[in-house]
Amino acid sequence: MFSFLRRKKEEEKAGITVYMSEPTLLYNTKTEKDCIGIIEKHLAPGKIIVPSKYGLRPTEHLIDESDVFVAIAIVGKLTSGVVREIERAQSLKKKIYTLEIARKGDHLEYALIEDVPDELEKLSPEQTKEFYDEFRVEDLPKLSDLFFGSRKSGW
């Protein structure tokens, strides 16, 4: 009777399930969409579990349901939440990839790498908070940008 009120279930294609571990800083951004596109292109999953679709609720238990785990690293850093989820994926012996994001000029570059490179900095919760604070200040618009606009592409 009220079928229009029901949420439509997402149709799942046959294939692997990928859990995408991302910093909350990227939730619902253009960069998150780009990351999903890269995962779809390179891993051809049947389903991608994206934590931002669950708001700020914990989603670590969904790692158990996945076949592949993809950690998102921003400018060579893994946030404490992503590190915690990597540890869980490793304990479950999941296939792990890292999607590194770096800024080159006004553009972002992406690299999908198998496993977790040792050179990535693993941040503690305190370091993650500092990183987020620095990151937000960097992306705050200047007063002149409010009036004249900015050509800088955001995350």
Image (cartoon, rainbow, N blue to C red):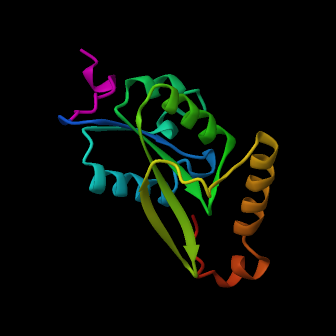
**Vertical position of residue 3 compared to residue 47: above or below:** above
Q: Residue at x 54, y 28 (%)?
A: 88
Q: Residue at x 59, y 53 (%)?
A: 118
Quadrant where the C terminus is found in the figure = bottom right
Q: Which span of residues is magenta-colored?
A: 1-12
- 70 and 141: which one is in front? 70
The answer to whether 66 appears left or right of 141 in the picture is left
How many marks overall?
0
Q: Which x, y percent locates residue 106?
A: 56, 80
Q: Which x, y percent locates residue 38?
A: 36, 57
The answer to whether 2 appears left or right of 13 in the picture is right
Specify the quadrant of the image occupied by residue 12.
top left
The answer to whether 17 appears left or right of 85 in the picture is left
- 87 and 10: which one is in front? 87
**Vertical position of residue 152 compared to residue 122: above or below:** below
Quadrant where the N terminus is found in the figure = top left
